[in-house]
Amino acid sequence: MPGGLHPPLSVIESWPAPNTTDPESHSHAASILAAIFGGIAVVTVSLRLWARCVIQRQGGWDDICVAFALIPTIGLNIAVPLGAYVYGENHHVWDNTLPNLISERKLAIAEELFYVFASCFVKVSVLLFYRRMGNRTTISPKFLTIIYLSIASVIAYNIAFLIVIFVSCRPFSAYWMEIDPTYALTQKYRCYNEPAHLIAATAISLTQDFITTTLPAIFSWKLQMPVKQKLLLNVVFGLGYLAVVVAAIRIYFV
């Protein structure tokens, strides 16, 4: 929302007259991308589980974690078009209704929960996969320690993030009700600095993504294989840096 949840009067006065009957809509890009990448995630994870658990019969904890990650990922991909087409997230704030804005805030809690669980399970799955690779090759105790510390940091971070979500406002209903100007002026409540929290949380997640993506480069370079194969393998692992770039962009726009 322009000006945040509580824009100053000067910002509100700059808004055009509301149009709730035929409001201007933003691009459908977010919903289209959610459908495309959500579908890719379902197909990719399904094929992996089929290959590892059914064909090879070598399923492990990394497969269990990625299967659990798929559930909130699907939920997140459903929430995107739900917010856009049911609660008006693809409209300008001045063209939306107060009930929709309140519902958007409730949906935001669900989206944050989906994101926390999905990202946690994905990162832990990747780190456990590195541990599995270490069982087949020579892996140093130091590298193992880094993997376990990374897993612990991911779990601790996500537990902390979950706690923050549910203690963010007192009373908790203020999380979605504070967007109502009447409520904000007449009720007693206390909420945290949401933008600052999102920036801090994203920065920590970005660091974890960077470490998780960099570990295989160190590990694979010590494998006994031709240099060309090592380079190609690191190119594949390097795709994980896309998550780092996305997190950095998110920090910029928050």
Image (spheres, rainbow, N blue to C red):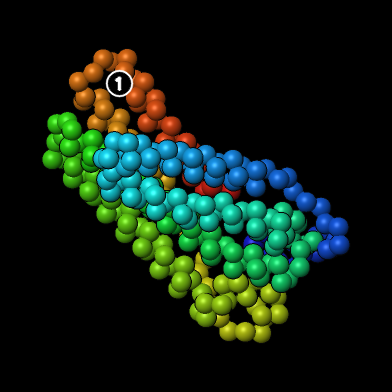
User: Mark 1: few, some, or many residues within 10 Å (few <14, many ≥20)?
Assistant: some
Relative image position of residue 215 (x, y in whole percent): 29, 36
Q: Is residue 48 above or below residue 70?
A: above
> Residue 104 lies in what quarter of the image?
bottom right
Apparent side of residue 183 relative to residue 188 in the rendered image (left or right): right
- Check the image and report above or below for 17 versus 47: below
- The residue depicted at 20 percent of the width and 20 percent of the height is 224
Q: Amino acid at mark 1?
A: Lys
Find numbered disc 1 in the image and state the secondary structure of the residue it sits on.
helix
| Residue 91 as seen in the image, left or right of residue 252 | right
Give the residue number, with chain letter if any, for mark 1.
230
Residue 228 percent across, percent down from the top left: 32, 14
User: Residue 34 vs residue 222: left or right?
Assistant: right
Looking at the image, which residue sits at the far front?
Answer: 55
- The answer to whether 50 is drawn above or below residue 105 in the figure is above
Q: Residue at x 65, y 58 (%)?
A: 82
Count of numbered circles on the image: 1
Residue at x-position 65% and y-position 68%: 103
Q: Residue at x 18, y 42 (%)?
A: 144
Confirm whether residue 108 shows in the render: yes
Q: Residue 160, percent across and down?
A: 37, 63
Coordinates of residue 162 in the picture (x, y in percent): 42, 65
Q: Is residue 2 visible?
A: no
In which quadrant of the rendered image does the N terminus lie?
bottom right
**Position of 187 relative to 94 (above/below):** below
